[in-house]
Image: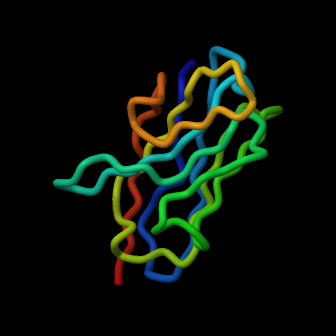
Amino acid sequence: VQLQASGGGLVQAGDSLRLSCAASGRTFSSYALGWFRQAPGKKREFVAATTWSGGSSYYADFAKGRFTIDRDNAENTGYLQMNSLKPEDTADYYCAVRRTSTAQAIGLVRDDYDYWGQGTQVTVSS
């Protein structure tokens, strides 16, 4: 499966962005979806993940209450809605998918994922 992330940009603190992850090549609904981010000089870190149906989601502590992960399997697209952005959210954001045979499967670490999109840059100014 090929993934294309988009929607990043330069925003001010307090603004919102909605990132998209368009999938092609295989049945998107068969994959759990995750978002990660990597700031300059830092390791890639987990942001949020959801199951193949979108029925269950999990968030990093910094994302809880501000970010929402969802997906539209009919459109083969995943999303990350980011509200109340802070300068420390500045990073390249990556989407990834994980092959799974169970509806409850979800990935919380980088090694859980099989396919990655290219990053989309998010810059939050103070």
Q: Residue furthest right?
A: 74
Residue at image location 78% in from the left, 45% down from the top: 55
Check the picture and name the quadrant holding the N terminus: top right
Return the residue found at the far top. Answer: 25
* Residue 28: percent from left, percent from top: 69, 25
- The x, y position of residue 114, in whole percent, is 47, 22
In this view, the residue in front, 100 or 66, is 100
Query: Against 10, is 103 above or below?
Result: above
Return the x and y of residue 30 as percentages of the image width and height: 71, 22
Residue that appears at 64% across and 22% down? 100
* Residue 101 shown left or right of residue 124 in the figure: right
Q: Which residue appears farthest toward the left when viewing the image?
A: 41
Q: Nearer the viewer, residue 12 or 109?
A: 109
Tally of numbered tags: 0
Location of residue 23 by image quarter: top right
| Way the structure is coloured | rainbow
Q: Quadrant of the C terminus?
A: bottom left
Image point (60%, 53%), residue name: 58
Residue depicted at x 69% and y 18%: 101
